[in-house]
Amino acid sequence: MSALRYKRILLKLSGEALMGDSASGIDSEVVLRLAKEVKELCDVGVEVGLVVGGGNILRGSEITSDTLNRVTSDQMGMLATVINALAMQDSLESLGQAVRVMSALQINQVCESFKRRRAIRHFEKGRVVIFAAGTGNPFFTTDSAASLRGVEVEAEILIKATKVDGIYSEDPVKNPEAKFYPRISFDEAIDQRLNVMDATALVLCRDHKLPLRVVNIFDKGAIKRLVQGEDIGTLVE
């Protein structure tokens, strides 16, 4: 087994990553494939925390209207992340991996409430910890939640899994000549508005010296190779 570059990681998955080729919802085969990737990380000794978005079900900021205010719509979005977290938990458990879902909202019938010390204890016992319901507050994205949880549980790196190989100057799907950045600073990412994560998430990582790595989740085994020392995607620090 290769030596590990990182022992404890926080992995951020978008809700859209769970829906496969569907227009919305959850593709169970995709969830199982992602769960297998996480299980492989655990098998080599990595402690894994997960934050999953809810955009495949409902994105709160996009349904705000004259009759539905932003606070309510964001709370609905938080609940969508809980649904995704439970789906991921079920797939991981089907592979024999111990896992706990910890919610920023109190939903004790289906998952634990988030407590920092308990989350760290779960890591120490070899359990995957899935952090659901964002920060528990409206107006904050799941990217910000991932940065916050990463800092709180003392993760060594925050890994954002996307549909592209890293950070580009423009959308590489729309512009094949877009410049790829193998390495960039947080200040550069913020100043150039590269849409890596929202500014709050980037500033939180920067101020607490939590490095960010952006990788392609559809590159099978990429995250495992990354934690074992291979330079993959874009490093932001």
Image: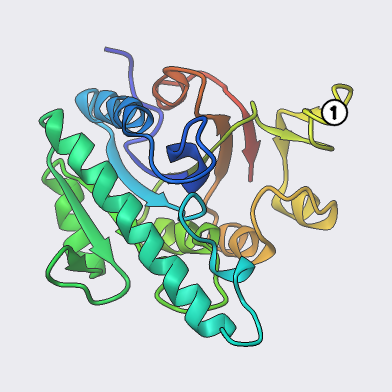
Residue 115 seen: yes
- Left or right position of 2 against 42: right
Dot 1 amino acid type? Lys
Report if residue 14 is visible in the image.
no
Total number of numbered discs in the rendering: 1
Please give left or right for residue 71 compared with residue 131 in the image: right
Neighbour tally class for label 1: few under 14, some 14-19, many 20 plus, Cα within 10 Å: few
Q: Name the residue under label 1.
A: 179
- x, y percentage for residue 229? 46, 21
> Nearest the camera: 229 or 58?
58
Residue 217 locus on image (x, y percent): 50, 29
Q: Nearer the viewer, residue 35 or 231?
A: 35
Vertical order, 116 against 64 (above or below): above
Q: For the N terminus, which image quadrant?
A: top left
Picture coordinates of residue 75, whole percent (x, y): 44, 76
Tell me residue 234's x, y (percent): 65, 32
Asked if residue 182 lies left or right of residue 48, the reply is right
Give residue 59's quadrant in the image: bottom right
Q: Nearer the viewer, residue 65 or 136?
A: 65
Could you tell me which secondary element the residue under label 1 belongs to? loop
Q: Residue sitting at 10 percent across and 30 percent down?
A: 96
What residue appears at the point 21 percent right and 73 percent down from the top-left corner? 107
Name the residue at 27% across, 45% down. Answer: 87
